[in-house]
Amino acid sequence: MDVYYTFCFIAAASVFLGFLNQYVLRTQTTIAITAGSLALSLIVTGLGKLEIVELRDWAAQLLPLMNLEDLLLKGMLGFLLFAGSLHIDLYMLRNQKIEITALAIFGTLISTFVVGYLLYFLFGLLGMPVPLVYCLLFGALISPTDPIAVLAIIKNLRAPSQVSIQVEGESLFNDGFGMVVFAVLYALAFQGTEPTFAAISHLFMVEAFGGIALGLAIGGLFHWLICSTNDHSLELLLTLVIPTAGFATANILGVSGALAMVVAGIIIGNFTREHGFSRVSQHELDNFWNITEEFLNGILFLLVGLFLITINFKPIDYLMIVAAIVIVLIGRVAAVSIPFQILKRHRRYHPYTERILIWGGLRGGLALALAMSIPSGVLISREDGGGTQDLGHLWVVMTYGVVLFSIVVQGSTIAPLIRRSREANYSSNVPPPNAGQQAQ
């Protein structure tokens, strides 16, 4: 029962941190919970070093039992992606389909390769010959913007609608696509898959198109079921089956559960909402999934902050954290700027679009969970005889540094940027997103 009790106390702590935030920090709840848990981790670590209170060993033994990798990738992710996609306006999504496709697919690939090759070059300078496929694997896990982090911060800041739908759409779809790229590189690195075009295409087709097809099937089935009943409670329970049994089915079949949940959520949020729910039921649907999303977000980001307790930092880790933050930011600039240099030749955009997309490209628990899935025991030897580095440990440390920087620093400083974008939206002649293809 220790794991269950720990989960209960962590859930309670996240709620109380959110409660205190409205009186103390008064910032975005996600940032407050992450910063609060980070501060708690530092206090626990400091008290242990001073031999005042030794909680580090206890926490280091108990927190891994929560298994953040499985908790997120096989559980909470389905709920959070489904809840986020319920609020995506399909009309707005279609209107921005070119931008979202460019960012989610080509932007993710650009960032993966930019980050991977820069990291490969850096390790070469440091005398640590890391194979390129491992560097690309880090690029794949860190490049997608985490929808859990992005949606939790962006949706309450009232960004201009054109920018908001691009940020939300990209974060939902590049998450699924990024996990597909990660799965392909993981198979090449650790499962002995031959790096042939046929093998990579097969893995991609199964993961990506299989996930989209399953999402369409799940969304269609539950659309019919919900439209066939007038029982309000049963309607909500049916939506609850999608991110539970539906997400589990995707994992069992070996297709992208992330893409399946996004597609199913868009169907339920756009078609079933209008035809299967009454006005009262629509209000209950929104309240139910908003509360569920807030609750799970709080637990996730509290765990992200507390995860610091379990890491044993080495001197080189601090250098690699700083390097990873800089490299990931460079990759994000390339992922946004390169597609938009082409798109801006044909369409008009809000003057703050690229800046918000670059600085709003937050990373969260998803990247950390993917990093934790990399097996330990892959040792990299230094050419100067300075010992070895465990690749799994290094990737987790670097990912953790990037995640904390993106949530605490980028997340806390993006609000002024969005406020300026709203002022620019009112004072300029920027057209609304539905004003025509050439005026976007």
Image: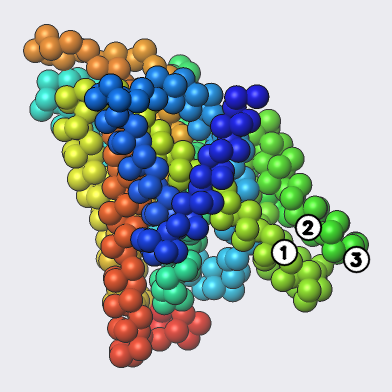
* Element type where label 1 sits in the image: helix
Residue at the far front: name it.
52
Q: Is residue 301 above or below residue 354?
A: above
Q: Is residue 432 visible?
A: yes
Q: Residue 33 at what x, y percent from top left?
A: 43, 50
Q: Is residue 426 above or below residue 344?
A: below
Q: Which residue is mark 2?
A: 236
Query: Looking at this view, is 175 or 409 the one in front?
Result: 409
In the picture provided, is 42 more to the left or to the right than 285? left
How many C-alpha atoms fall within 10 Å of the one at disc 2: few (<14), some, or many (≥20)? Answer: some
In the picture provided, is 358 more to the left or to the right than 13? left
Quadrant of image for the C terminus: bottom left
Residue at point 13% right, 12% down? 386
Residue at point 50% right, 39% down? 180
* Element type where label 3 sits in the image: loop
Quadrant of image for the N terminus: top right
